[in-house]
Amino acid sequence: MLKRVAVLVSGGGTNLEALLNARESGRIPHGEIVLVVSGTTGAYAAERAKKHGVPALTLSRKELGQAGFEAALAACLKEYHVDLIVLAGFLSILSADFVSRWPERIVNIHPSLIPAFCGKGFYGLRVHEAALSRGVKLTGATVHLVNEIPDGGRILLQKAVEVLPSDTPETLQRRVMEQAEWVLLPRAVEALCEQLSQ
Ligand code: GAR
């Protein structure tokens, strides 16, 4: 039976798009994306989900508060019989209690080579700003299991990406997405779904 995947998002949703495209082109044969949950109102990611015919719900963490958000999220995950949670640019923090209920079942993508540029305050463009100010010549992306939010847990895949002298945070972000994130995340999701099917 196909493993049922929920994708949690907060913003643009390009990693979600990569997952949906991978699923549609046969690169995730052991899983299906059954639900997209946005933690913020108006996230473009929710539109992407709808365009692919996947149900998208918004649970505003701002409005519901942490406990309310997690209770609502847990109820949705149960309703959709979700097996695996993918954090794809999901920028809210999940509590240790929530995470402990999904051992080895939550996977996150982070736009650096962990342990560099991760932890509190490192998300989205900020990660690339930090990499550029430090002057690193290589950066990349990491897919890891989540035991502790934001960046704890066993690393599953990493890919290095070159930093160019002319880079801005935006150009670097784009290259890391194209060369690493959109490649690694579908691959990791398929590997986990296959593992869960055994
Ligand atoms: C991605 O670069 C993702 O790696 C990053 O946010 C971006 C979301 O883009 N995640 C983090 O920084 C998590 N700490 P997307 O909404 O277009 O996928």
Image (cartoon, grey):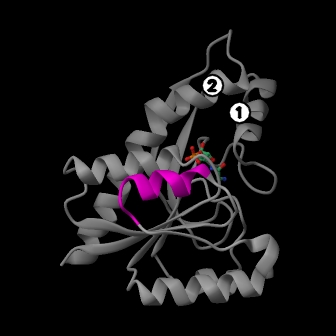
Residue range corresponding to the magenta coloring: 44-54
| Residue 118: x %, y % from top left | 71, 50
Report if the CB atoms under discs 1 and 2 are less than 8 Å apart: yes
Q: Is residue 65 left or right of residue 97?
A: right
- Name which residue lies at 39% across and 64% down: 54
- Name which residue lies at 72% across and 48% down: 123
Query: Whole-Å distance between the Cαs marked 1 and 2?
Result: 7 Å
Q: Is residue 55 left or right of residue 148?
A: left
Secondary structure mostly taken by the magenta-highlighted segment of the chain:
helix
Q: Name the residue under label 2.
A: 172
Q: Is residue 38 left or right of residue 18?
A: right
* Label 2 neighbour load within 10 Å: few <14, some 14-19, many 20+: many
Q: In which quadrant of the rendered image does the C terminus lie?
A: bottom left
- Name which residue lies at 81% across and 25% down: 133
| Residue 105: x %, y % from top left | 45, 75
SS under mark 2: helix
Is residue 196 something one can see in this rendering? yes
Q: Is residue 116 above or below residue 8?
A: above
Is residue 109 something one can see in this rendering? no
Q: Mark 1 points at which residue?
A: 128
Q: In this view, does 111 lie to the left or right of 68?
A: left
Return the disc, 1 or 2, that comes first in the chain's sequence: 1
Q: In which quadrant of the rendered image does the N terminus lie?
A: bottom left
| Residue 2: x %, y % from top left | 22, 73
- Name which residue lies at 29% across and 60% down: 191
Q: What is the number of the mark on residue 96?
A: none
Q: Quadrant of residue 125?
A: top right
| Residue 62: x %, y % from top left | 81, 71
Q: Kindly identify the amino acid type of the residue bearing the numbered disc 2.
A: Leu
